Amino acid sequence: MTVKPRILVIEDDPDLNESITDFIRAFADPEAALNGADGLYLAEEGIFDAIILDIMLPELNGFNVLKKLRAKQIKTPVLILTAKDALTDKLHGFELGGDDYLTKPFHREELIMRLKVLLKRTGHFFDDDGLTAGPFVVHVTSHEVLINDQPVALNGKEFDLLVYLLQNQKTIITKDQIFDRLWGFDSETAVSVVEVYMSNLRKKLKPLKVEHWIKTIRNVGYIFQEPEGSE
């Protein structure tokens, strides 16, 4: 199964929210929030690959959501979506850390195009080139993993875990983030399953002597990066 980017849609109009999630479902895994407070709560998990953020939101407006996210070092790309088209509003959105701006009403094709550009820019939209890091080459669409040109067989969640690590190279990822990303907020599985799959993944990497690319940060999580002293 192809790993799809996860997109958070924060839009208070239920019909528009549903339409947007339907638009992007062909290439992404969307999750919806209908107000700023709920959107901020979900976005703070740090498990999304992009956020579509309306400005005129109840409880907490989009500018404040964006400001709070950037203050907490949540760097998820944000596509600002709003009926406001004044230059001052656009500039304010960019000043707060927005990545792109789309004014309502908009064309479906333009929303999809702009979102894909954001995802490609951060390595979260896949084509035949896939993901690479040192000896690792992962073709996401064909579910193929090559290490030093040798194929490695990974099951579904092991593959998803490796992809998530490669997407976030040199970034510490907590166990909770991995759990929420791969198993979902509502999963009845215990978070300890992350350790089980991480152990299984390392065992499959060990014969190729690349298991040390995944480093455990005690009491925090994991980081994927080239080991010190590697040539």
Image (tube, rainbow, N blue to C red):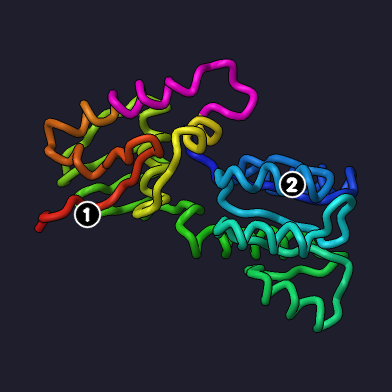
Q: Cα distance, mark 2 to mark 1?
A: 36 Å
Q: What's the amino acid at mark 1? A: Gly
Above or below for 66 versus 199: below
Q: Tell me: 200 left or right of 4.
A: left
User: Residue 208 location in percent, x, y?
Assistant: 13, 37
Q: Residue at x 45, y 33 (%)?
A: 175
User: Residue 66 location in percent, x, y?
Assistant: 70, 61
Is residue 22 in view?
no
Sequence-earlier tag: 2 or 1: 2
Q: Which residues are magenta?
A: 183-200
Q: Tell me: 168 left or right of 83.
A: left
Discs 2/1, front: 2
* Residue holding disc 1: 134
Is residue 159 in view?
yes
* Residue holding disc 2: 39
Judged from the image, the secondary structure of the residue bearing numbered disc 1 is loop
Q: Residue at x 66, y 54 (%)?
A: 51
Closest to the observer: 57 or 123? Answer: 57
Mark 2 nearby-residue class (10 Å; few <14, some 14–19, many ≥20):
many
User: Residue 28 location in percent, x, y?
Assistant: 61, 44
Above or below for 142 versus 102: above
User: Magenta stretch: residue 188 in it?
Assistant: yes
